[in-house]
Image (tube, helix red, strand yellow):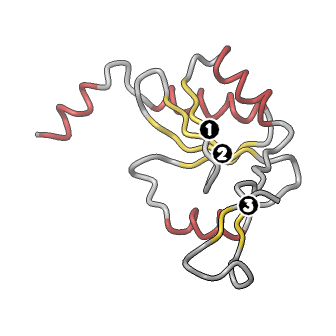
Amino acid sequence: MRGVRLGGASHAESQTLSIHRYSASRDENEPEIVNYLREKCNVKIYRLAKPLDLIVQMRDGTLILMEIKMPGKRHTPAQVRFLESWCAKPAPIFTVHSIEEAEAVIQAMEDAMPEDISDCYEQAQQ
């Protein structure tokens, strides 16, 4: 196993860390959902390793976080802690299991946004 020895310990005392310590586990349905969102919904996707799967940039620039799960799978304990601590104001979080659910999220977000987002900023400053 290739790795890196930590600290100034002797060879016998050293710990070895592999650069392949954690394998990124992606849900099987993620590629098809990501491809659909990029191609059909015309949004930008940034894949994450943790704590969730995706940052999605809507056409108007709004950001949402998205976790993709296979049907029947649950959030990990780390994801539950993150979800419990996250304030939805910077970016809402959605968990989806299918293309249809992902598309419904995108559509709902677009429907909730005014056509000219600058009006929201002007109203908020008044």
Q: CA distance from mark 1 to mark 2?
A: 6 Å
Disc assigned to residue 18:
3
Disc assigned to residue 53:
2
Earlier-in-chain disc, 1 versus 3: 3
Q: Nearer the viewer, residue 89 or 16?
A: 16
Dots 2, 3 in contact, CB < 8 A? no
Q: Is residue 21 above or below residue 45?
A: below
Q: Is residue 6 left or right of residue 31?
A: left
Amino acid of disc 3: Ser
Please, which residue is most extreme toward the left here?
126
Q: CA distance from mark 1 to mark 3?
A: 23 Å
Image depth: mark 2 or mark 3 in front: 3
Q: Nearer the viewer, residue 3 or 42?
A: 3
Picture coordinates of residue 121, whole percent (x, y): 22, 33
- Point 62% across, 43% down: residue: 66
Which SS class for mark 1?
strand
